[in-house]
Every structure is written in structure tokens, then in C-alpha cells.
Amino acid sequence: MFIDRVVVNVKAGDGGSGIASFRREKFVPLGGPDGGDGGRGGDIILVGDSNLATLLDYTYRDTWTAPAGDHGSGVNKSGKSGKDVIMPVPVGTVVKDLSTSELLGEILENGDRLVVAKGGRGGKGNSHFVTATHQSPREYQPGEDGEARTLELELKLIADVGLVGQPNAGKSTLLSVISAARPKIGDYPFTTLSPNLGVVQLTDGRTFVVADLPGIIEGAHEGRGLGLLFLRHIERTRVLAFLIPIDAMDWQEEYDQLRREIESYSPELAQKPHCVVFTKMDLFANEPAPPIDAPDAFGIFAISAAARVGLEPLLASWWSRVLDLKKEVVRRDDTVSLP
């Protein structure tokens, strides 16, 4: 089951209290204060795990609590700190504080770590309060409370190419042909109810990730159909491919509608590079792509996934565009890092 949004409660460990203690040793009648400090409470930490593809595990358990730090003891012994609690999440997870809507961070790569709740600081023992005029302090500090939050975890897929189209546009069939992914395929609308990822392998070790996303209908930006369940998953794709079946009633209107939905949801998303892909061309004996007004598209392609026709130029174009975008990001990062 694909779960891309969950709410969990987290509670970091409380800090242990310091202690008021005095040395009690034979032949040492005036033993001084020796109260130790309390241990620090454990943190709650999210860690990116590329082996995970869903937030399903967090539907079974929605409360996570880190151990508290131990209290201090005599002879200046500090309490043991509480262990951190590690919560593995899929790469692409966005973390928000549900009560304040504050964005706490994002997990973008395998191994990324994000502290979402900090453990409480341990309190000081009475040995810290000794002064020249206060030789026998009985003061000590209690430990601080660990942070408690209600988190919203939302998974937004990270893919190089996102397949955009109405139900039955041929997205799942295309993904199953160009990768090892096996999405559900049927001859009725909305066979894809959750996103699917596939890795496309070209020659010379070249690979990129393609996402087959649930079909979009008019009004999707308002939540109609699968609505926002679909649209939020294309925010992180580098390239969009608008799939239009050759048997559509009006090719231009279908393309324009898809563009409008993307623009209405996010103007920034509408600026991503995109191409137009006519699918199911085997129905028309693999004729050339029909005319369509798409001046912003970097290419117009005609394919038949079922007949394996027209795929090579399409995949080559995707790879070239994705590679250029990756190089652009590297150049921008290098520029930013210059002193």
C-alpha cells in the first residue's frame, strides 16, 4: 500500500536532574559537595532511507518517545544520557510541525538526518554552585523537558521525468515497457491509484528515474478526481512529459487542459521543461505525430509503447534534458560556494 502522508507524535527524552550530595569519607570530616549532573535526554531523529518507498510503517505506530537521561549521583558522577530514537523515512519526505505549520526540513538524500525533537538538557549538581562564600550549596537543577511535537510527514516523490496525462493516456504501459516497474494496467480509467517509480537503463550505464503518476482530470488543482494526491508528486520532477493518446477527442484541448491544471496548482511547476508525447500510435498505423501548438515544449514525440515504436528518440531526449539540468544544478552550487 502506498502511503504518502501520515501524522505522528514525537516526544524527546527529558533531561535527568542534578543532585545535591556531599562527600562522606572516613577521616574526611569536611567533605565538600559532589553532586553530579543529570544526563541529556535522547533526540528524535529522522534519517533518509533509500530502501523505503512509502510511509506505511507509521500508520501502525504513531507515537515515538525517546528515553530520558538518568539523574546525577554522588562522587560527581553524571547520569547516563538517553539514547536517540532513529526514525527511517523515504527520500523525499517533507516534515512539518502540524500545530504551527512550520517547515522543519526535508529528507532529500539517503542518510540525511533531521532532528525533529531535541532532548532536554541535564540539570547541574550542587558541585557547580560552590563559591568562595557559599561552600556547602544545596542547590541543584532539575532536568529540562524534551521537546514534544505533532509532525506531518509528507512524501513527495523525487524523479527525473514525471508522466502527466489524463486517465488511460498510456502512462503505466509506457513505464512497464521502458523499465522493470510493473504498475497496474487496465482498459478503464484510474487504474493507477498511487505513483509508481521505474528506473530506465540506457547503454553505457546511463540511468534515470521515471514516475508514472495518477491521472489528472479537469479541476485536479481543486482536489477533483485524485487531485492533490497527484499534483504534489510532480513538484520535484526535473522534466514533465504530457502524454496524449492519439484516440483523444481533441489533442490540443487535452494538452491545454493539462497545462492549465499544472499552472493553476503551481506557476513554478509550469515552468519546468516539458515535452509532448502522443501515445497509442499503433492505432493509426504508427503515423507521424499530429500537429499541435506547444511552443514551450522541447520536443513532440509519437510512440507506441505496446509495439515498442518511437521509444529510442524519446528516451534519448529525456536523458539529454535531465543531464543538462543536473549539470546546471552543479554549476549553480559551485557558484554559490565561491567565497
Image (tube, rainbow, N blue to C red):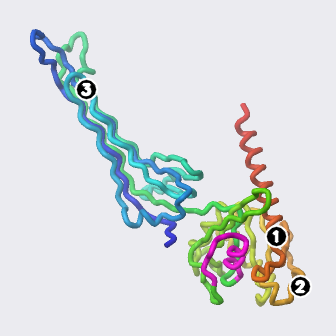
Asked if residue 132 is positioned above or below residue 200 in the image, the reply reads: above
Tell me which amino acid carries mark 1.
Answer: Leu
In the rendered image, which residue does mark 2 sit on? 287
Residue located 36% across and 62% down the image: 61
Instruction: Please indicate whether residue 320 sits to the left or right of residue 71 in the image.
Output: right
> Residue 327: image x %, image y %?
78, 49
Residue located 69% across and 63% down the image: 269
Q: CA distance from mark 3 to mark 1?
A: 68 Å
Q: Would you say the residues marked 3 and 1 are in contact, meaning their CB atoms lie under 8 Å apart? A: no
Q: Secondary structure at mark 2?
A: loop
Residue located 28% across and 29% down the image: 78
Q: Would you say the residues marked 3 and 2 are in contact, meaning their CB atoms lie under 8 Å apart? A: no
Q: Is residue 179 magenta?
A: yes
Residue located 18% across and 26% down the image: 20
Residue 252 visible in image? yes
In the rendered image, which residue does mark 1 sit on? 314
> Residue 141: image x %, image y %?
25, 31
